[in-house]
Image: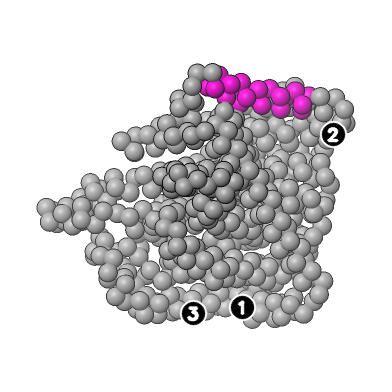
């Protein structure tokens, strides 16, 4: 047994490991189908039942609306937390006296606060509304955005900014033409991380504090043991997150890295 | 104004007057937040916002009262256990393709994206259906949520490993185990610690949902209980207790550990 294969070995045999991956997928689906014949459908919905439930789900505008609500919650929360996180990081960077307040007090506090805590508290404050869901997702995302943008600002190429200054760029121009573009890779990484974390929290928040979205469907399905719906929702989320990561975030991030070098 | 040097602690790079001012701002914010909370609690009904004193009393109980302390301790033990288990399983999964390149696709194209996009509440609800309400359920859910985080970090470390050091070590000894224990593991240590840090954070912030659904013990359970029986002071207290425990773990264990590893 080799302890570590040289990197080139894995590059040389791409079809080999892809084949193994496909076989693995088939194996898992086979095991799933087999398990579904042994285990009562209330505990495990087999591939075929899940596919049928998925078809019914896609044809039902009511259910699709809940999918739309979840997307809306996640989307708005990402935008809000991105702007709040950026604003705090910029403030700490450009007004250094506030750095301790932001990175030494606000950020660790938000970072240590539990997601369920936000969901239950905002339910108390705002009732079962969209605001509750969006608020609790945003509060969980803000520290991620803040820490990421702090890294970005810390790695800013100071020489580049200096050079901009020596070429007589005005403050605002220097900011929009040099600082902001150098931060693109970090901004993008922030969005990518936020997207992944948002989905993890969104359903919890919707289940606890909202009458809409995937999380709400989840709660209904759980209460009357409609296991296929649980499987459909989980499947849809996995497909969403995977596709977004694979076909949107990864290619764009690779391009940004090639273009801007860092991050 | 020149931004502070990110490598130095923030406060050190500022002149004395600004250093004092930054402390005043940071601690002033904390004082102001408590005062604002107190003033708002006077104006709002106690079932929405209890006073800071009432919440502090409950926090004190969470760490002293024998029943509450039992819940607190259960959560701490569960988190520690789950983080350890997730680190082991994530580590094994990360090492698998390093040993056998054909498994790369299975781990990185199938298992990792699957676990990474699986909604955390999905685990919680399915595990309750599968294993009923038990300690095992709570730990299963936490481990399932944490594995992708440890897996990603440790495989990142394996990618960056200094291959030449390992080659050289291998030319000195034929014992694979010795190379692993003396060279690979120490080189990986920073990544293992950062995996530990992330898993620890996610465990307290997100994975606590397992206790809300999967058990009759722990802080997560207490939070759900507090919400249902309308004891807002206890709910707030749970949130702050989590912040305190999180800080304690970070300052007492994780920070010293990363300092040792970096040296």
Q: Chain of mark 2?
A: B
Q: Looking at the rendering, which quadrant does residue B171 occupy?
A: bottom left
Which residues make up the magenta segment?
Answer: B18-38
Neighbourhood count class around disc 1 (C-alpha, 10 Å): few under 14, some 14–19, many 20 upward: some
Q: Is residue A88 above or below residue A75?
A: above
Quarter of the image where the N terminus of chain A is located? bottom left
Q: Which residue sits at x=58%, y=56%?
A: A191
Lower position in the chain sequence, tag 3 or tag 1: 3
Q: Which residue is mark 2?
A: B47
Distance between mark 3 and mark 1 Cα atoms: 12 Å
Q: Say what secondary structure mark 1 lies in.
A: helix
Task: Give x and y (percent) for residue B189.
Answer: 34, 45
Q: Do marks 3 and 1 both belong to one polypeptide chain?
A: yes
Q: In front: mark 1 or mark 2?
A: 2
B25 inside magenta stretch? yes
Task: Give x and y (percent) for residue A43.
Answer: 65, 67
Q: Is residue A126 above or below residue B52?
A: below
Q: Do marks 1 and 2 both belong to one polypeptide chain?
A: no
Q: Which residue is mark 1?
A: A47
Q: Which residue sits at x=52%, y=47%?
A: A169
Q: Please give the label number shown on residue A26.
A: 3
């Amino acid at each position: 047994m080799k302890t570590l294969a040289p990197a080139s070995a894995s590059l040389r045999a791409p079809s080999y490991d892809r084949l193994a991956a496909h076989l693995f997928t088939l194996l898992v689906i086979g095991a799933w189908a087999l398990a579904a014949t042994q285990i009562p459908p209330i505990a495990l919905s087999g591939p075929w039942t899940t596919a049928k439930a998925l078809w019914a789900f896609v044809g039902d505008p009511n259910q699709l609306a809940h999918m739309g609500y979840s997307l809306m919650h996640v989307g708005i929360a990402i935008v809000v937390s991105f702007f709040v996180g950026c604003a705090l990081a910029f403030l700490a960077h450009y007004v250094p006296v506030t750095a301790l307040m932001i990175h030494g007090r606000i950020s660790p506090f938000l970072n240590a606060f539990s997601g369920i805590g936000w969901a239950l508290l905002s339910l108390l404050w705002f009732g079962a509304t969209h605001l509750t869901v969006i608020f609790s997702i945003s509060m969980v995302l803000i520290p991620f955005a803040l820490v990421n943008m702090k890294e970005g600002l810390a790695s800013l190429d100071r020489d580049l900014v200096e050079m901009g200054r020596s070429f007589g760029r005005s403050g605002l121009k220097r900011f929009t033409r040099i600082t902001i573009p150098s931060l693109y890779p970090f901004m993008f990484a922030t969005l990518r991380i936020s997207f992944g974390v948002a989905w993890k929290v969104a359903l919890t928040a919707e289940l606890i504090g909202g009458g809409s979205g995937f999380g709400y469907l989840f709660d209904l399905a759980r209460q009357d043991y409609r296991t296929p719906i649980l499987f459909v929702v989980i499947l849809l989320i996995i497909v969403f997150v995977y596709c977004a990561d694979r076909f949107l975030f990864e290619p764009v991030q690779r391009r940004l890295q090639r273009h801007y070098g860092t991050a | 104004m020149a931004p502070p040097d990110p490598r130095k602690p923030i406060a050190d790079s500022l002149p004395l007057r600004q250093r004092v001012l930054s402390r005043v701002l940071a601690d002033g914010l904390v004082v102001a937040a408590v005062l604002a909370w107190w003033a708002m609690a006077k104006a709002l009904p106690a079932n929405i916002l209890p006073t800071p004193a009432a919440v502090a009393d409950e926090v004190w109980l969470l760490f002293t009262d024998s029943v509450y302390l039992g819940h607190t301790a259960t959560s701490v033990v569960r988190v520690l256990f789950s983080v350890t288990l997730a680190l082991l399983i994530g580590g094994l999964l990360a090492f698998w393709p390093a040993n056998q390149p054909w498994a790369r696709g299975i781990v990185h194209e199938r298992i990792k994206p699957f676990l990474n996009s699986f909604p955390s509440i999905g685990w919680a609800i399915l595990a309750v259906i599968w294993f009923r309400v038990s300690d095992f359920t709570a730990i299963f859910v936490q481990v399932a949520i944490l594995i992708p985080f440890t897996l990603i970090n440790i495989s990142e470390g394996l990618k960056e490993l200094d291959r030449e050091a390992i080659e050289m070590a291998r030319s000195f000894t034929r014992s694979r185990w010795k190379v692993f224990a003396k060279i690979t593991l120490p080189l990986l240590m920073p990544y293992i610690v950062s995996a530990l840090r992330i898993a620890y954070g996610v465990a307290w912030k997100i994975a606590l949902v397992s206790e809300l659904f999967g058990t009759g013990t722990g802080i997560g359970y207490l939070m759900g209980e507090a919400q249902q029986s309308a004891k807002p002071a206890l709910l707030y207290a749970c949130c702050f207790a989590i912040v305190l425990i999180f800080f304690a773990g970070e300052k007492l264990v994780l920070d010293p550990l990363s300092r040792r590893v970096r040296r």
